[in-house]
Amino acid sequence: MTVTTTPYVRANGPDYGTMAYYSEMFSDILCDVGECEATKTTVLAGLLDALKSWIDYHDKAACQYEDFAIELNDLVKELLA
């Protein structure tokens, strides 16, 4: 099965996934960093929090795949017995 995806296209901005798209996103963050020292620290803390959140998400997904593999393996063993 072949799956094709169409990049998200915004009406008033660069296409999702392009360098211009990410440049615009980073520009929004960088303009906040220029406000004051406390904002810079908050932006860094937010980046670390987002990273931790993604790591937690993928750890949970990996555990779910492992559980599924165990159940599937048990089912196959039953069917072949």
Image (cartoon, rainbow, N blue to C red):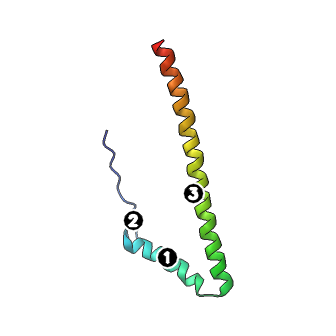
The disc at residue 77 is: none
- 10 Å neighbourhood of mark 3: few (<14), some, or many (≥20)? few
From this view, report whether residue 26 is shown above or below residue 80. below
Of the pair 32 and 75, the residue shown nearer to us: 75
Image quadrant where residue 11 sits:
bottom left
Residue at numbered disc 1: 26
Amino acid, disc 1:
Phe
Circle count = 3
Compare residues 8 and 75 and report the one nearer the observer.
75
- Residue that mark 3 sits on: 54
Q: Is residue 13 visible?
A: no
**Residue at the outermost left position:** 2
Amino acid bearing label 3? Trp
In the displayed structure, 4 sits above or below 44; it is above
Image point (50%, 25%), residue name: 73
Which badge, 2 or 3, is on the more N-terminal residue? 2
Q: Give coordinates of residue 15: x percent, y percent.
A: 37, 67
Q: CA distance from mark 2 to mark 3?
A: 18 Å
Residue hosting label 2? 17
